[in-house]
Amino acid sequence: MIVDSFCGAGARGNRHHIVALDTSTLDTGKNIEAQIWQQALKPHANTLVLWQQNDCWHARFFDCGHPVLRCGSGNIAVAAYLYTHEFHNTFNLTLHTAAGAVTVGVDNKGAYYCDRPCPVSAKDDPARWTHLCQTPVSTAVRMGGRQDYTLLLLPDPQALSQLRLRARALKLYSARSVIALAPAHRYWHLRYFAPQYGVPEDAATGSACVQASSYLARITHHRRFSFNQRSRARGIIHTEKRPHEVIVRGSYRLY
C-alpha cells in the first residue's frame, strides 16, 4: 500500500510504501527484526514496516535503507492504513516506534498523531548558521540531545528559499538535523535537512513541526500553527500545542 501524507492544494506531501508484516508465523524477536531489515532494504525512498504483536502495534521507518528515528508523515500513513484496513471508524491507539510511543488515530477531523517535543537545550550562534546556510539567520537554538535538532528562525520566506546548506561542513560541525523557519502571511514556511542521516532535504516533516510548534508557542503565545513545507514536493501540516504534547494533523491519499 502507498500513502501520501501531508498533501493538499499544490502539495504532494511525503510518500510512504507500507509493508504490513504477518507475525502469526513468527515466534521470536530475532525473526521479526530479520523481516524488518529485509523490507527496509527495498529501494523505496520511504519504507514503513508495520506489525502487530501481543495486541500492540509497532512501526519502523526507513529512507532508502537508512533507519529514521522519528517520522511524522509515517505516523499519519499508519493512521490512514489502520483506518482503511483495520478499524473502518474513528480510533486512537499507542504506536511503538524506535523513538518511543506516540498516539495515532483518526477522528472527525481526519488523521492525526500526538508526540512530545524535545526541550530547548541551548542557544546557538546565528552567525555560524548564516555561514552554513548561505542566507541570513536571525535566531538559532538547539532542541533535545546531540543527535536531535537545531531550529533556525529566518527573517522572511525569501531568505528561506535562498537557503543552500553546506552539507559537508554541517556533517563536521553537528549531528543535529536542521529545521529552518520563516514567518509568512497564512502559514509558517519551513524546510528540513538531515544530510547526516541520508536525507538532504525532506518533503514533509511532521516531527520538525512538533519541535517548531513547541518553540513558536513560547515566543508567540499562540497554540495553533499551520506550516507550508517549501520542499520540491511541498507539504501542508497543521498543529496544536498542548501542555505536554503537540497534535499533528494532515491530509493523505491512498494508492
Image (cartoon, rainbow, N blue to C red):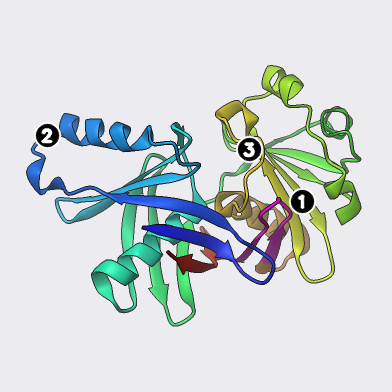
* Location of the C terminus (image quadrant): bottom left
The dominant secondary structure in magenta is strand
Query: In this view of the protein, which residue sits in the foreground, 244 or 14?
Result: 14
Report the disc number at residue 181.
Answer: 1
Query: What residue is shown at x 26% (from left), y 73% (from top)?
Result: 87
Which is nearer the N-term, disc 2 or disc 3?
2
Q: Is residue 156 visible?
A: no
The reply to whether callout 1 and callout 3 are in contact (CB within 8 Å) is: no
> On the picture, is 204 further left or further right than 44?
right
> On the picture, is 247 further left or further right than 233?
left
Which is nearer the N-term, disc 1 or disc 3?
3
The crowding category of the residue bearing disc 2, from other C-alpha atoms within 10 Å (few below 14, some 14 to 19, many at least 20), is few
C-alpha separation, residue under disc 2 versus residue under disc 3: 35 Å
Residue on which the image places disc 3: 149
Quadrant location of residue 6?
Answer: bottom right
C-alpha separation, residue under disc 2 versus residue under disc 1: 44 Å
Query: In this view of the protein, which residue sits in the foreground, 86 or 206?
Result: 86
Query: In this view of the protein, which residue sits in the foreground, 213 or 64?
Result: 64
Residue on which the image places disc 2: 28
Relative to 206, is 242 above or below? below
Magenta region includes residue 98: no
In the structure shown, which secondary structural element does the residue marked by tag 3 occupy?
Answer: strand
Q: Amino acid at mark 2?
A: Thr
Q: Position of residue 253 (x, y in %)?
A: 48, 68
Q: Is residue 52 visible?
A: yes
Q: Amino acid at mark 3?
A: Tyr
The crowding category of the residue bearing disc 1, from other C-alpha atoms within 10 Å (few below 14, some 14 to 19, many at least 20), is many
Instruction: Report the span colored magenta.
Output: 226-241
Q: Position of residue 130 (x, y in %)?
A: 88, 33
Query: In this view of the protein, which residue sits in the foreground, 144 or 70?
Result: 70
